[in-house]
Amino acid sequence: MRYQTLLAAALCMFGFANANGCLAQYNDQEITEINEIADELNITPCAATDVYNYINNAYKFGIHKGLSDEECHDGCVNEATNLNVLGESVVNDLVSICEKKCYVNNMEMETTPVAEPESELINLVKRANPCDPIAKGKVALVKSNFKFGYNQYQDKGTKKTALSQVNGCGPKKAVFGISDKTMKKIPLLLDGTFEPACNMHDICYVCKKGKATCDKRFKSGMYNICNKKWPAKTHIIKNKACKAQALIFYEAVNLGGKGAYNGRPVNPSVNCAACGVAVIKNKLVKTPFYRKK
């Protein structure tokens, strides 16, 4: 079957096969994506099916837990053998996507933070986090459409709001137990690409909007950033690579963020300044944004 696939790809690459035949097994949405790949890479739709299948299926060899980074790499390279006609740089991008998906399949956190008993947390809130009046908190809009269409805000009240707890995408190692090895697999985390989504996630955690809800919003926010920075219609490979990195970070907070979520740096009540200021409770807990310090 593999040789038949290779033969079909070769025929398509050189124009000896009919595109309709190559695309017959795909639905309309998949065909649209395949055509976008073909346009970006300047290849035939038939050849683009191999790229599409690789992006969506090649990492599945790692579905069984326990693969090392080296095994993920070797498996992804092996699965990419029939893509070499695309050129080294494109193949390297595709292998990187595959490796990240394989890594997610085998991801385990190095540490599992232990949450304090809820009763003790409540006592900590009472002792350390007073309920400041909402009127004493103020979050100012500094600039609309600051970058990628996201707004920039600043804490300007006489009492600090949850915005003061935002630190972008780092440092997360101590908070979520993310290893250095994992961090290196998310360069878009380190270069600030995901900063608006990280800021939203921080406030969502601080204001206790539900860990699963916050994590899902986080992933959606990162995916939206990928779509803004690398629109799929013109940069589908980069878009997929971006989302593969976003998935690693989502899984990291999903697996290792319980301790951070259970922390109480401020009083999370919507009746207090920290989380009760309108722009925070109605917008920043669910919308990516930039913070001006």
Image (cartoon, rainbow, N blue to C red):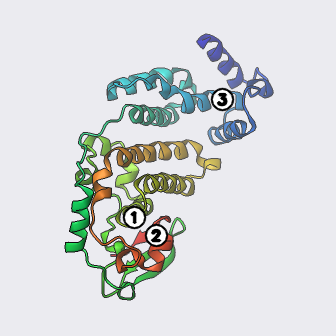
Estimate the spatial distance between the alpha carbons at disc 1 and disc 2, rounded to whole Å. Answer: 8 Å
Of residues 286 and 127, the one nearer the viewer is 127
Give coordinates of residue 105: x percent, y percent. 41, 32
Residue situated furthest front in the rendering: 119
Amino acid identity at mark 3:
Thr
User: To which residue does mark 3 refer?
Assistant: 49
Q: Position of residue 126 (x, y in %)?
A: 23, 73
Q: Kindly report which numbered mark, 1 or 3, lies closer to the viewer in this rendering.
A: 1
Q: Residue at x 30, y 57 (%)?
A: 262
Asked if marks 1 and 2 touch (Cβ < 8 Å), the reply is yes
Which of pointers 1 and 2 lies earlier in the amino acid sequence? 1
Q: Residues within 10 Å of mark 3 (few under 14, many from 20)?
A: many
Q: Is residue 40 visible?
A: yes
Residue beneath disc 2: 284
**Which quadrant is the N terminus positioned in?**
top right
Locate residue 167 relative to residue 127 in the image: left or right. right
Q: Would you identify the image quadrant in which residue 247 lies?
A: top left
Density class for disc 1 (Cα within 10 Å; few <14, some 14-19, many ≥20) is many
Q: Residue 257: which numbered mark, if any?
A: none
Dot 2: what SS? helix
Q: Report the amino acid beneath label 1.
A: Asn
Rounded to the nearest whole Å, what is the CA distance between mark 3 and mark 2? 40 Å
The residue shown at (27%, 61%) is 263
Residue 162 vs residue 223: left or right? left
Q: Earlier in the sequence, mark 3 or mark 2?
A: 3
- Could one spot residue 170 in this view of the protein? no
Kindly identify which residue carries mark 1.
Answer: 199
Where disc 3 sits, the SS reads helix
